[in-house]
Image: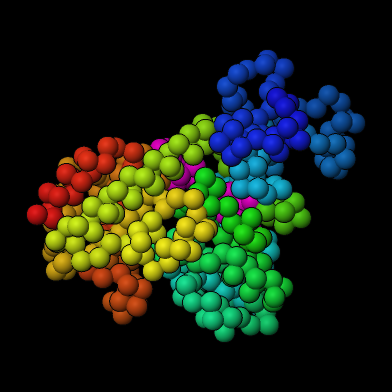
Amino acid sequence: MASDNTEQACWHPETLAIRGGREISEYREHSQSLHLTSSFTYDSAEQAAAMFLGELDGYTYSRFTNPTVAAFQQRLALMEGGERAIATATGMAAIQAIMMSLLKAGDHILSSQSLFGSTTNLFAGLLAKFGVETTFVDATNLQAWRDAARPNTRLLFLETPSNPLTEIADIAAIAQIAHQRDALLVVDNSFCSPALQQPLKLGADLVMHSATKYLDGHGRVMGGAVVGSDALIEQIYLHVRTAGPTLAPFNAWTLLSGMETLHLRMEKHSASALELARWLETQPAVERVFYPGLASHPQHELALRQQSGGGAVVSFVVKGGREEAWRVVDRVQLISRTANLGDVKSTITHPASTTHARITPEARAKAGIVEGLLRVAVGLEHVEDLKRDLARGLD
Ligand SMILES: *Cc1c(COP(=O)(O)O)cnc(C)c1O
C-alpha cells in the first residue's frame, strides 16, 4: 500500500480522487496498473481451498473482484465518505443490483418521478413483474413522500438535481422520512458526482452512480457503482458476484484516470454552466432558464446548502414551441446533438422529441417537458464559443 488508511482519512477530496485506494505492486509502478486477467492462481491446494471458503482474502476470479476494479471501488468509497463500494458494468446495472439484492416480492419502492428514463422503466416494468411495486412522487414535495409511504415501503429512491428541469430534492429531509419508516434512502448522484454533493453525509444509506457520466467525464466507457455501509454493500456484492453485472478491469482503469481530474472538471463545468445560464436569462428569445445556481431557481437556497456547485446541466425554454427549439438544435456547429452527457464536450438535446418522446403528451406536460424546452450539458469548451453557438438559433 502507498499509505495506510488513517493517513488517507486525513486527505482532502481532491487528493483522494488522485491517490485514494491505490495499491502499488511489487514493481512499484507510479501510475495505476491494469490487471487484464479473468482468473488468479494459488500457491497450493490448501491456499485454493482457504480462498474458496473465504478464510483467506485475495483474488480468485474477476467476476468476484479484480485489483483494478478494487482500486476503483476503494477510491470512490473514500470520495463519497462511505465504508465500501461495489462496481457494476453500467449505472443501470447498479440500480438493478440494489433492487435485486435488497428487495423481495411484496416490497414497495417510493421514488421521485423525474428520473432517468431507463430507471423509470426498470421500476415500472421489470421490478413490477417480480412483485415489487413503485409509487412515483414529486421530489420537491416532502408531504407527498410522507403521504405515499406504506407499511411495506422498504426503499426510497431519488435523483437530484433532476433531469432535465434541475429540481432539487432535500436529501437530509427525505432521509429522515425514510428512517422514520425503517426504509433505506438511495440517491442517484450521477449528475453532481462526489465533487459537488455527498449524499451519505446528508443521511442517505446508499449512493449510486452512472460512472459513464462525470466519473469518467470523457464519454469513453460505461460503468456504475454503489457506495454505502459495509453491511449493505456486502449484500449487493454477493448479488453482483453471482449474477455477474461486473465492471470490466479496463473500464475501471479508465474511470480511475477520469476521477483524477473530477474536481477540476466539475468546478469548471459548474462555472461555465452558471455563466451560460445567466446569459440565457438575458436573451429575448428565451422564456425561462432552469439552473440550480441561478437566484431565480425555486430551490436555489437548498441547492446552495446541499451542493458545492450547480453542475453542468442547464435547461431553458425558447419562446414559441418545437419549431423554435429545433431551430436552435439544428443550427449549432460546435455543441454535439446527442442526448448523452457527462463529457468534456457540450451536448444539446430536445427532451420532448427524444428522451421523453415515448411518454404521453399529458405525462410530458405534467413533468414540465414543454415543446420549447432544451437541455444543454455544458462541457469544458470556452463559454464564449458556446454562447456564440447557441446564439445562431436564438437570433
Ligand atoms: C445515464 C444515467 C443512468 C444510467 O446509467 P448507464 O451507465 O447509462 O447505465 C442513471 N441515472 C442517471 C441520472 C443517468 O444520467
- Residue 123 makes an appearance in the image: no
Q: State the residue at coordinates (67%, 49%).
A: 82
Where's residue 331, x and y in %?
A: 13, 49
The answer to whether residue 26 shows anywhere in this view is: yes
Which residue is at the front of the view, 216 or 138?
A: 138
Give the image quarter of residue 335. Answer: top left
> Is residue 220 a member of the stretch shown in magenta?
yes
Looking at this view, name the residue that lies furthest to the top: 27
- Return the x and y of residue 159 as percentages of the image width and height: 49, 62
- Residue span colored magenta: 206-227
The residue lying toward the viewer, choosing from 114 and 67, is 114
In the rendered view, tell whether residue 39 sits above or below residue 281.
above
Q: In the image, is residue 307 above or below residue 32?
A: below
Q: Residue at x 58, y 52 (%)?
A: 198
Residue 395 x %, y %: 9, 54
Residue beneath the point at 54% across and 81% down? 143
Viewer-proximal residue among 282 and 176: 282
Residue 35 x %, y %: 62, 27
Quadrant in the rendering for residue 185: bottom right
Quick check: is 91 in the magenta stretch?
A: no
